[in-house]
Amino acid sequence: MIQNKSNILWRMSRWNLKPRCSSILDFLHKREDVDPGVSDVSVPFYLELPTEMRALLDAGKEREIKNPRREDVVFQDKINTKERTPMKNRLTLVILTACIFLMSIVSVSAAIDTIECNRNIAQTTVHSTAIGLGEVLKNITDEKERIHLIGSFIDPIRFFPDKSGYFYVYNYDCVNTAHATQKDLVGKNLYNYKDCKGKFVIRELAEAARKGGGFVEYYWAQPDLTGTHKKMGYVEPIPNTKYFIGTGVYLDEITLGETLVRQLWADLKDRDIEAVRKKFADGFQSVHQYGTNNREQEIELLKGLNLGEYTLSNFQTTRNGPVITAAYFISAEETINGKRLSNNPTPRMSVFLKTQDGWQWIAHANLKPMEQIKQ
């Protein structure tokens, strides 16, 4: 069993495991005061590694014992001669532990995407990272070095299925210390910054951090989208420092499925077939009580739709990475090919796929059509 951290780092690089923790390991190798060969790490650290990573490391060790390569022996000799200090041990351990933890968080968030789950992920991720950074920073007295370390650490980290999760760090005077996506904010005092609703965002975040941590709702720019979007931020103080760290959940993402459905039906009501056509993804299919339609057949069907007033209700949306599924009910004054249908609520299901052209309609289910009104 591998109990030495130098062995772990060495084999992560040799056996191509580095991409699994690339953000943290890149950071470790760039810092001169971090020794990737520090040791004295025992079984508990090894047991924290994912099962598949431990299996690869152990298998690699067995092969190397039987057939050691010359460059491996030289590399290991260099590691064994390096100076080791308790500070370096703690720094490497804290950052690697944070790396492993964040990998597990991303894995969980890819499977489940609800507002409560994302709140929990935001809170847990910020808490773990704040404690880890606090442990590292308490031994660094130079302010510039502290700021550089914070920025280098948070810059590459992204989480949530759409990679909209990132970290930001401020001091309690509301000066931005580091921001993973908006570099133009670094060094700026945002004490007087207001969002589109007039809220002093950074003041409220700082106040929540002073109280030990908390959630704040506000509007903020979202990566890869225009305008500002509603966000629920969570912040905590970084122990032993004058900084606080935070992240947030874009609430628009939680209701995005409903938004896409409502826009689709609005275009249908306006009889804007070209706008609807652009929403169809390649490979679209629909299922109806009478059979199935492909993309072109569904467009032809919608050309004959004459939609009056309608009501959408009872939305249930889920998201798994680039796919959103929305189930809902519709009641409408609807005529298709001259036949008037009743306005009793009937269920529908629409599926949307995120493509390079934005969100597109990839599938639709209409197994209980609105009944035709008897003349």
Image (cartoon, rainbow, N blue to C red):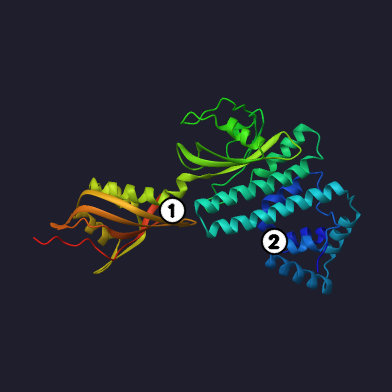
Query: Which label belongs to residue 355?
Result: 1
Residue 247, quarter of the rendered image: top right
Please, what secondary structure does the residue beneath circle 2 have?
loop
Residue drawn at (44%, 53%), measured in percent from left and top?
354
- How far from the left and from the top, in percent, is residue 216? 55, 38
Residue drawn at (58%, 32%), measured in percent from left and top?
204
Q: Nearer the viewer, residue 53 or 64?
A: 53
The kind of residue tagged 1 is Thr
Determine crowd level at label 2: few under 14, some 14-19, many 20+ residues with C-alpha closer than 10 A.
Answer: some
Please, what secondary structure does the residue beneath circle 1 have?
strand
Q: Which residue is mark 2?
A: 17
- How far from the left and from the top, in percent, is residue 360? 38, 53
In space, the residues marked 2 and 1 are separated at their CA atoms by 29 Å
Residue drawn at (52%, 58%), measured in percent from left and top?
112
Residue drawn at (51%, 41%), measured in percent from left and top?
231
Name the image quarter holding the C terminus. Answer: bottom left
The kind of residue tagged 2 is Leu
